[in-house]
Structure formats: structure tokens, C-alpha cells
Image (cartoon, helix red, strand yellow):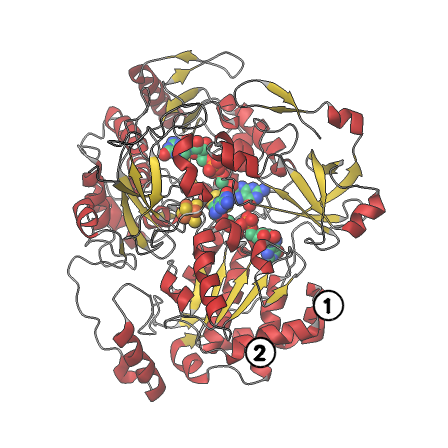
Amino acid sequence: MTEPTKTLCPYCGVGCGLEVLPPALPGKAVNRDKEGYPIWQVRGDRAHPSSQGMVCVKGATVAESLHKDRLLHPMLRDSLDEPFRRVSWDEALQRIVDRIQTVRFTQGADAICMYGSGQFNTEDYYIAQKLLKGCLGTNNFDANSRLCMSSAVSGYIQSLGSDGPPCCYEDLDLTDCAFLIGTNTAECHPIIFNRLRKHHKKHSQVRLIVVDPRRTETAQAADLHLAIRPGTDIDLLNGIAHLLVRWGDIHPEFIEECTTGFASLMEVVPHYSPEIVADRCGISVEDLETAARWWGESQRVLSLWSMGLNQSSEGTAKTRSLINLHLLTGQIGKPGAGPFSLTGQPNAMGGREAGGLSHLLPGYRFVNNPEHRAEVEQFWGLEPGQIAAQPGYSAWEMITALERGEVGLFWIAATNPVVSMPDLVRTKAALRRSPFTVYQDAYYPTETSAYAHVLLPAAQWSEAPGVVTNSERRVTLCNQFRTPPGEARPDWVIFAEVGRRLGFRKQFAFNAVGEVFDEFVQLTRDRPCDMSGLSHDRLQREGPLQWPCPETETPVPPQATGLNRWLRWLLHRNEEQQQPAKRLYTDLRFNTPDGRARFQGYHSRGVAEPPDPDFPFVLTTGRLYGHWHTQTRTGRIPKTRQMHPEPFIEIHPRDAEKLGIEQNKPVNVRSRRGSACFKAKVTTAIAPGTVFVPMHWGTLWAENAEANALTHPEACPDSKQPELKACAVQLVLADVKQAETAKVEERSGKLETASL
Ligand SMILES: Nc1nc2c(c(=O)[nH]1)N[C@H]1C(S)=C(S)[C@@H](COP(=O)(O)OP(=O)(O)OC[C@H]3O[C@@H](n4cnc5c(=O)[nH]c(N)nc54)[C@H](O)[C@@H]3O)O[C@H]1N2
Ligand SMILES: Nc1nc2c(c(=O)[nH]1)N[C@H]1C(S)=C(S)[C@@H](COP(=O)(O)OP(=O)(O)OC[C@H]3O[C@@H](n4cnc5c(=O)[nH]c(N)nc54)[C@H](O)[C@@H]3O)O[C@H]1N2
Ligand code: SF4
Ligand SMILES: [Mo]
């Protein structure tokens, strides 16, 4: 019998285990796609603890995307106006190395920038950090996680002392009250949602609250849907805190013994009476009171959040305001409770562990901490002072540095910024100014390849082994089961080769990816994300494991002696139910110097670009169930493509009527930065005054339907995460004739007339 290969779904941060079998099994017909191409067979891995055999449509169909339109060879050109010519790896890499040396010695190392991705494996991330931050001495490595998780990272760090979601998926089966805010879990983390939904259906006392300006599929399953105005989350969260305090539904012992900064919250909370909050959020006082009552009376409150909070000009304040509620009520460090950030990409977590943002170093360390720098320099065999003391550029700061002509080499890998960055008019103009852009991707073309001087073919999921961490801190080894097409190479192999050619032979003397992982985990020793007990061999043998996973598991020292009776009881109860690493903070000691979690009260500032008479609508953007980001995979799979064949704009019937907009008629949408045109989807699922467009359609997949032609780059001052969830737009009924001739480009290269 053919043994299946164990791996993980390469899409979302749920991290469902997959088993993969070859297209041809003995005695069975060859599994083929519609075009007759043999396709590997994918099924859920029942032994994977995170997903227990479940998969959604994206995981089930992923194998159909692997062979289409791949970038097969390195390609090169001297200017963006020339065609690419195929070159050898040797020529491409030497060109990059020569350019790096020129830039280092003329402009300085900080003129080199790399923009990576939560779709790297942990080993890719780690090697990139070693190359950029270590050997080259520039912290200009940032990832698309900046557009995704960085407000959750800064919120956790500031409130709890370190990054890392404290919860686990079992909490979905144990909670009494699930509070989902700014997350369309049903479409974006479907297997998590299924698990929660099952628990909710089975136990009538379990409450499900969803906070989202849109009546999403997630909201439709809720007992209470709070359709707040975009950007009013802090008002709502402070409003709930106000009522919890007023009703005495708080946990004084927890606050007293386990937290600091309560006074800071109390300065803010009195200003958020139910009437004021209901008015600002556009909800009823009754609904607000219901939410607060359910939070207050539940034994176990679990909150889930994702981009509706993170992608905001006050993203850190939003995530901390949510964590405040958990601290106020002691809803953390116990089963079924806690603030649970759902990670977007498959390895956004691993990226954080490996230090893959421009202010981080491996092992949850910080660039601006001299001890952390010294530890890493010593470990990497570098001179003291080689790691720069200042954080590097964030994703958007790389764009502005390009605008100023300060970047000599821009290296993009495993992300498609010409669709996913905010303000695409500016982004594209900045990329056109780049004197030398390397683009390392699995597919060709993508929207970004048009802006590259060098294209490097990357081996993707299925073609290179590596480790990935999912939202519940569970680390899975993804095994290779296909050979890379053409000359494609794994990302870490490419980075390591460049490192060696630059003269750092000792630092990049790896023979196998398992050695890279072994080295990386040493840097996590005694850190909050301790993975020193993990190796590829162990993960192969024992299956996926959660961190912290120290090399020698020392029993947790009894912390309970100084605590009062209530806390001792809680601890004892937890210990009985716990496996180590299942949940963080079960000893109620946080990763701050004094072991206490920190309250911080914030006033809401609202969105960075509020609507006004010229741009009267708030545009919000997001995702659809069947598509993944910029469609490099899901656009090439018939099933997912048919689920969502074309872009659209959601608009409330009242607004549509006012503007004379009819169902399915084209609408021009303009912001201060750019414009786009979408078919109208008139629906009461969106509130009046707000419109929604999906983020998935770049110029390869539809004409003039880019969400990010409209968005702006204003970002949270702490997390530097741009506000992709709100900008001001105007809507104008489009000239139907003009729209009818709009073309949607088929990936096969044909042009077909869209039925706009
Ligand atoms: N199908 C699918 N699944 C995915 C992905 C994908 O591309 N497709 N991508 C993955 C990635 S990388 C990510 S980051 C996650 C994202 O997962 P989610 O965050 O669930 O997805 P989004 O659709 O971006 O946004 C979530 C919701 O935020 C709401 N929202 C907008 N503004 C506000 C606001 O001001 N307040 C509140 N409370 N809510 C607001 C939107 O209406 C939307 O329903 O999904 C992951 N899973
Ligand atoms: N308006 C708006 N914009 C958004 C968002 C939003 O909600 N609204 N969300 C933001 C968020 S949360 C995210 S995460 C980003 C996502 O945005 P992107 O990162 O731009 O989206 P992807 O399409 O996932 O791009 C991944 C690229 O990596 C390639 N790839 C896949 N596997 C590999 C590999 O192993 N190696 C290499 N080298 N390449 C590989 C794929 O072909 C693809 O081109 O978008 C952000 N932009
Ligand atoms: S829920 Fe996420 S990880 Fe699981 S199969 Fe679907 S896309 Fe893949
Ligand atoms: Mo994301």
C-alpha cells in the first residue's frame, strides 16, 4: 500500500494537517484535473491534532494549482522596458551578489531591502534574517505580516510581555461565550469556525457574539451580531468595560494580583456610557448591554480576532482594548478563555519566532535591545555591533524609501505587493523607480513580475520540506512530495547561496534544511517561544507539537505560594487539566519583568480618513471563502474560480437607490488616490454608508478592480500596520457602454469579454 505523505495545508493559519497520495495508485484510475493533468490526491489528516481530518475547499483543491504557470528558470533584464531573457542560476546569483556589493560599498547596507512573507517556511525566514540583519548588517527585512499580524504582535507584547497567542483550539470546545471581533472566521478560518459552530449548536447555553460592520457568514451564525461602524471597535470595547465595571462583573483578585495599570483603564472607561457608545457605533443600547452581560456572566470567555482589528491606524490600541476586557474579568490562562489572535498566513507565527519583521530578531528578540543583539551576534559568529541597533524599514517605509531613491536593491519574495500593498498608484510608481528589483516567486507572471529586473524561480509547498507554526503554536513538519519544476529552488537555498557567495561561508554551511532548523531552535532556548526540544526528526516521529517545547522539560516551579486562595485553586484546577504548552499563562505569570499583565486605556481616534461630503462612503476590504489573496493559486483552480468568478462591490439598497445604482450594474469607485470599477452587489448585509470590495483581483485577473488602488497607507504608530480596512470613497454610476467593453484577462492569455 502507498503510504501518504504528511504535510500541512499551505493556505491559512488554521494549519490543517493533510495527507497526500500520488496521482496514480495501484489498481486505481489516475487522478486527473479537467485538462487531463495528473493531480496528487489530498485528504485531511485525521491524526493532526489541530484539524482532526477536516479541510475546507482551499485545502482540498490545492494540488490542482501546483503545475500551472510556474516560473521555471531565472530570468534577467537591465530595465523594466526590456523583455526578460533566460539566464543560468550562476549568472542570476552573481548579478545579485555584485549588486549587493556595489550597494553596500557605495550607498551602505541600509540601501538593501528584503520584503518577505508569512508563506515562507521557518527555515527560509531564519536564513533571510541571518543574511540581512546579521551578515549584511541591515535590519531592512520586513514581511507581508506587517499588513497582517503586526498589531496583534504589538498588542500581545505590550499587554502580556511577549508575543504568542495564549490559547489553543481545544478552547473552541470549552468556551461559554465566544466573542468574534473583526474576523470573518467562517470564510477565512473555516475549520476553526466549524469546530466552534459545532460546540455552539450542541450546547444551547454557549453564546456567540460577532462584531463586524458586515453581516458576514460568521455574523449570520451569531446569537448577537453587533454591526458597528468601521473603526468604532475601541468605543465598543470601552463601552463593554464600562458596563462590566458598573455592574461589578469584574475580577478584583485577578486585577490586584496579576495586573498593573488598572487606573489607566479607569481614566478612560467613565467616558463610554452605553448611550454614547451605542450612538458612535451605530448599534442599540440593548445589544451593547447584552454583549456586556454575556461577557460578565460567562465562566469562560474566548475572544477571536483578525484583520478587522489589526488592519487599523489604531490597531495596537484595538487589540489592547480587547485584552483589557480579558484582564478585567480574569478570562485568560484557563481552558476555554483568553484573547486568541487568528493568524492569517500559514507561517505568520513561524515568521515571528524567527524574527521576521524589521524590529525583531530570532527567538522573540528585539533589534533595539543591546543584550538581544549581542546574543544573536555571538551565536552567528559575527563581530560585536554588526547587527544595527535601529529597527529597519517596515513594508510601507520600503516604498517611501524607494520613492526617495534611497534603495539600491529591493528583493521581494513570496508576496505579490503590486496587488496587496496599500495605495497601488504610489506603490507601482515607487517600484518603477527601483534601480534593481529581485523577485523570487513560484508563478509567472504575477502582477509584481512586471516590476522586476531579476526573477528567481522558487520551489513552493510540496516541493521543499520545512517547518510551519499555526495559530495555536503547533509546529508541523511539511514533507516534500514532488520535485520542483524546472530549475526552481527552495527559498532558503537561494538565500544561503547568496550568503556564501558574499563570503559568509561559515554562516551558511548547511547541507540540509533540518540543519537550518536545528540551528534556529537553539536561538529560542529559554525564550517564550522555546522550541529547543524540536527537530525535524522528532516532528517526523511524534507528529506536530506545540511550543513552548524546551529541550529538557523541567516541571513548572510552583508559583502559587504567594497568591491568594482563589488563584491557588485556579492554578491547581488548571494543572490537572493541562498538558504543558497547551495554553500560556496558566500560572498567571505573564512575560513582563514583574510577571503582571498590563492594562492600558485608550480613547478611540476613529479611522484615519473619515468620510466627508466629497468622499462620503467608508470602503472596507477583505476576503472570500474560495480565494486566496492575489489568486496565484486559487485563480488557477476551476472550482475556487467558479465560486467567485468576478469582483464586486457590496452596497446597501438605500445608498444604491440614492445613487441610482442597480444590482449587477457597474459602479466607479474613487478615493483620493485612485479609482476602480466593480459590479454592484446590492445587499442589506452591509450597513448604509459603508461599502465592501474583496482584495483578490489584481490586474491579471480583472481590469480596473484593484481594492488597493483605493486604500491608503496610514498606519498604527506602534505596529506600523496600514489601515487596509477603511478609507473614504465616492461612488458614481459607471457608463454602461464603457464598462461592457471592459476585459477580464484569462490566465491562459486569451482575453474574454466580461459580462459586466
Ligand atoms: N478564504 C480565505 N481565507 C484566508 C485568506 C484568504 O485570502 N482567503 N487569507 C488569510 C489571511 S493572510 C488573513 S490575514 C486572514 C484574514 O481573516 P479575516 O480577518 O477574517 O478576513 P478579512 O475579510 O480581511 O476581514 C475580516 C472582517 O473584518 C471586518 N471589518 C472591517 N472593518 C472593521 C472594523 O472597523 N471593525 C471590525 N470589528 N471589523 C471590521 C470586515 O467586514 C471583514 O468581515 O484570512 C486568512 N484566511
Ligand atoms: N485591501 C487589502 N489589502 C490587503 C489585505 C486586506 O485585507 N485588504 N490583507 C493584507 C494581508 S493580511 C496579507 S497577508 C497580504 C497578502 O498579500 P500577498 O502576500 O501579496 O498575497 P499572496 O497572493 O499570498 O502572495 C504570495 C506570493 O508568494 C508566491 N509563493 C507561494 N509559495 C511560495 C514559496 O514557497 N516561495 C516563494 N518565493 N513564493 C511563493 C505566490 O505565487 C504569490 O505570488 O495582503 C494584504 N493586503
Ligand atoms: S481552514 Fe485553512 S488550513 Fe484548513 S484547509 Fe482551509 S485554508 Fe487550509
Ligand atoms: Mo494576512
Q: Quarter of the image holding residue 216?
A: bottom right
Amino acid carrying label 2: it is: Arg
* Nearest to viewer (mark 1 / mark 2): 2
Of residue 746 and residue 139, the one placed in the foreground of this image is 746
Q: Is residue 170 left or right of residue 135?
A: right
Q: Report the quarter where the C terminus lies.
A: top right
- Residue lying at the far front of the rendered structure: 27
- SS state under label 2: helix
Q: Quarter of the image holding residue 664?
A: top right
Q: Which mark is residue 532?
A: none
Which residue: 34% across, 74% down?
Answer: 588
Of residue 201 and residue 123, the one placed in the foreground of this image is 201
- SS state under label 1: helix
Of residue 90 and residue 141, the one placed in the foreground of this image is 90
Which residue: 39% across, 45% down?
Answer: 346
Residue 393 vertical placement versus 185 (above, below):
above
Q: Which residue is mark 2?
A: 293
Decide which of tag 1 and tag 2 comes sooner along the chain.
Answer: 1
Visible residue check, residue 603: no
Visible residue check, residue 175: yes
Crowd class of label 1 (few under 14; some 14 to 19; many from 20; radius 10 Å): some
Give how far across and how far down residue 307 sits, in percent. Answer: 53, 52
Q: Quarter of the image holding residue 433?
A: top right
